[in-house]
Each structure stands twice: as structure tokens, then as C-alpha cells.
Image (cartoon, helix red, strand yellow):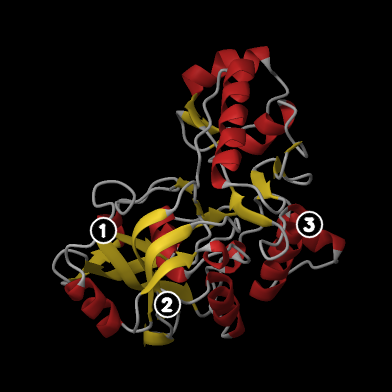
Amino acid sequence: MEIQTNFSLKNYNTFGIEAKAAQFIAVHTVAELRTVLQENKDTPKFILGGGSNMLLTQDINALVIHVDLKGKRIVDEDDDFVWVESMAGENWHEFVLWTIGQDFGGLENMSLIPGNVGTTPVQNIGAYGTEIKDTFISCEAIAINNQETQIFTAHECNFGYRESVFKNEIKDQFIITSVVFKLSKRNHKISISYGDIAAELAQKNIITPSLKNVSDAVIAIRKSKLPDPKELGNSGSFFKNPILTKKDFAPIHSKFPEMKYYEISDTEVKVPAGWLIEQAGFKGKRFGDAGIHKNQALVLVNYGQATGQEILDVSKKIQETVYEQFGIKIDAEVNII
């Protein structure tokens, strides 16, 4: 293991932003991670996973530790379920495809989400009606200050909409090293009611979809709407879908009856941020090399040489305009660094 200095992070963030790390090291085992933490106790640290959910607006004046832990295994199973552990550095989409290949159900709706397994609980990632919390059992993490291992259950993670304890109460205190999921082996609960999945399956005349059919449909939909970060820098959905109380939403909906929304509880609704941004006129717009994708208004993109600050400025312009037009606040899902 060797710490590198003045290290370019361009290839370590899906926006493809050019930013430098004062120091950089990749760790491939938990033992290596412990050693790096012990030997650099007094050095400011920045933990880097797949780089898929962040916007770098500046150089990082710290030791960047790239968590590159690989491996997956079955830790337990019965007739109906299997408990699968994945190390934090595994690519999320490749892990999802592996579970589908084993006919393990539960993650298929989250196919093609960028990033690594270790960051999925932090954000409680989700897509097409499912979230990490639906299959998450526990994760193992190392405390940065004393290198002790701690297990976090689903309850202890305090999952919310794109939220967890790792983004709030214990932010920057732990590094997730592995995650355990409980997946179905039979009688899979196929979920196709959200978004365009049912329409995609119907187009292919698939009446009784398999896990792979659902995954293929999700992949096709995402590819049609979302750019590949390897071809066009982006971080997937940049904004969260705002959640409003029905009381607050009623006068807004009365003023804009065409506004789309989803009822998520007896007292709350979720409004698609993409619809708000598109109605505000931003879909497909470009500001220099920073812009909004032509097929999905939720996605901000780097056309080549945009800085993180330029992309952040565009995001703020969107937030201000949406609020002025609809009276709805939309928050960034991406972590601004």
C-alpha cells in the first residue's frame, strides 16, 4: 500500500469532474483499511466508494481512502430465503445481476443503479417501488476513530427516503465494509406496478415475468432515460422527489391540477421532481458544459469540461425556479462536496 499525493479523482467520480486529492490510497482488505486508519489517525480523511452519488466542487484536502473490498457469499439459507453478504467494493449492478443469476429475488427493480454495494445503505437507494430497506438485514462497519467493528441492523440504520443514520446522526464516523441482504429463493414477490415496467413487459408479450424479465425491463427503461456515466458524466437522479403533506399539497394541486403525484400514506404525497423541472423549462437545457439531460430532467450532466461548481450553480437555478413557479422545495439527492 502506498499513499499517492496530488491524485486526480476524475476517474473516481461518475460526473467525471477534475478534482485533486491531497493524498489517495485504495484498500482491498479490511486489514488494510484498519492499518491505514491506525497509521493516519490525525490526518483528515475522506471515504470514497464508487463515486456515483457525489458532486466534487473543490479539491479534497484530505487522505482519500478508496474502499475497494471485493467478494460475496451466502451466509445462511432455508427453503424460502437466502442471506447473502457482499463486500462494500462490489459494483452494485453486477451484484444485482449475480443474485438474479442465482434466482434470488428482491433486488431486480434496482438494476443498473450506479455505485458500489457499500454506499447503498447510506442513501437507502431505491427504484421502481423498492428500496434497500426492503431486503437489508445488516451491515458491518469500522469506526474511523478506533477501528472497532460494529454491526448495524435495519432498525439501527433508521432508514428514510434516501436517508439513513449514516447520513445524519453518525455521519463520517463509520466505514461500511459489507452488507447482508435477505432474498427470496421461491415465491418471488414480483413488483411491476411502479413506473413503466408493466408497459415494457406488455410490449414484449410477457404475462408472467421472471426476475430476469423484470431486471431486463428496468435496464431497458433506465437506458432509454438515463445516460451512461462512461459516455456522459452524471450521477443519476440529482434531486429527491419532494414529499408534501396532503394539507400543504391541496392548494398547490388546486392551482396546478395537471401536477402528477403519488399517495404514499394517509397524510403524505410524493411529487415527481422530474415533472416539476421539466415544467419549469429545464429539460435538455445546457449552460456551457453543464446541463440537464434531454430524456430525463432529474439528471444533471457534464458534457465534458464542466466544473463541479458550474453543475452546482445549475442545480441551484433549478431549485429557485421550481420554488418560484410551484412553491415546492426540491432537495439534492447527490452529496455536494
| Residue located at (58% from left, 77% from top) | 94
Q: Which mark is residue 44?
A: 1
Q: Is any atom of residue 197 visible in this view?
A: yes
Q: Amino acid at mark 1?
A: Pro
**Mark 2 packing: few (<14 Cα in 10 Å), some, or many (20+)?**
many
Across and down, in percent, residue 13 comes to: 54, 61
Q: Earlier in the sequence, mark 2 or mark 1?
A: 1
Residue nearest the observer in this picture, 102 or 47: 47
Q: Is residue 262 above or below residue 296?
A: above
- Classify mark 3: residues with Cα within 10 Å, few (<14), some (14-19) or many (20+): few
Q: Which mark is residue 224?
A: 3
Image quadrant where residue 98 sits: bottom right
Q: Which residue is mark 2?
A: 68
Q: Judge from the rendering whether residue 49 lies leftward or rightward of residue 273; answer left or right.
A: left
| Mark pair 3, 1: CA separation | 41 Å
Q: Which percent across, then down, holds residue 4?
A: 39, 74
